[in-house]
Amino acid sequence: NHTMKNGTFPKELVKTAQKVTGAEHWAPELSRNIIKLCKCDVVNQACELRGELQITSTTDYFLSNASRFCKEDFVPTNDDIFRAKLKTTGIIETKFENKGVKFVMVDVGGQRTERRKWLHAFEGVTAVIYLAALDEFDLKLEEDNETNRMEESLRLFGEVSGSAYFRDTTWILFL
C-alpha cells in the first residue's frame, strides 16, 4: 500500500470508494464498504490535511459515527442534524408558519459565482440571518484556493450589511 503523501492510493481503497460512490441504492454491502473506507489510514490522513483538501470540519464526526449511520434502524440525533452541511447553489425558498405567522426563508449560495443572484432575493425582507462558519478558519475558497474562507465570509458580511440597500433591515449573525 502506498501512502497518500506520494499521490497514489491503495488499489483496495480505490475499489471500495468506487463501490460507495457508484451505488444506486442502499444495501448492506454499501454499509460495509462505507465503514471500511472510514477505517482506512489514507482517509484519516486526508482528514488531517483538511485545510488543503477542502474537507469540512464535520467529516471526522461523520467518519467516527459511520457504523451507527449504516444501521438499518438509524434515526439521526439532533447532533447529527446540526453537524450536517450541504452546499447551497442557487436560491432555495422555504415557506413555513409558526403560531399563525408566515415566514419565507431564502437560502442563497455563498460562493462568489452565486452572489450575483442574491439581490432580487432580498426584496422586501425584514431580517437577514447570516451564517459565517468559524470552523472554516483553516480552509481556502474553492474558487481561488488562496483566500481564507472565514475571513472572506466576515468581510462579505461587513460589506453587505453596510449596504444602503439593507439600511432598514435587521441582521442576525451566527458565528
Image (tube, grey):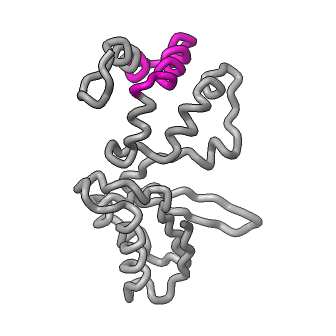
Q: How many marks?
A: 0
Residue at position x 71%, y 23% in the image: 73
175 versus 81 height, above or below: below
Between residue 91 and residue 23, name the one nearer to us: 23
Quadrant for the N terminus in the image: top left
- Residue 159's quadrant in the figure? bottom left
Residue at position x 38%, y 88% in the image: 164
**Magenta region, main secondary structure:** helix
> Viewed as shown, does residue 93 lie left or right of 114?
right
Q: Is residue 135 within the magenta segment? A: no
> Viewed as shown, does residue 174 lie left or right of 12?
right
Between residue 136 and residue 142, name the one nearer to us: 136
Q: Estimate the x, y position of residue 26 in percent, counting from the top left.
A: 53, 18
Residue at position x 33%, y 42% in the image: 53
Q: Estimate the x, y position of residue 66 in percent, counting from the top left.
A: 58, 27
Q: Residue furthest right?
A: 99
- Residue 8's quadrant in the figure? top left
53 versus 106 height, above or below: above
Quadrant for the C terminus in the image: bottom right
Between residue 51 and residue 129, name the one nearer to us: 51
Q: Estimate the x, y position of residue 163 in percent, counting from the top left.
A: 38, 85
Residue at position x 54%, y 20% in the image: 35
Q: Which residues are magenta?
A: 19-42
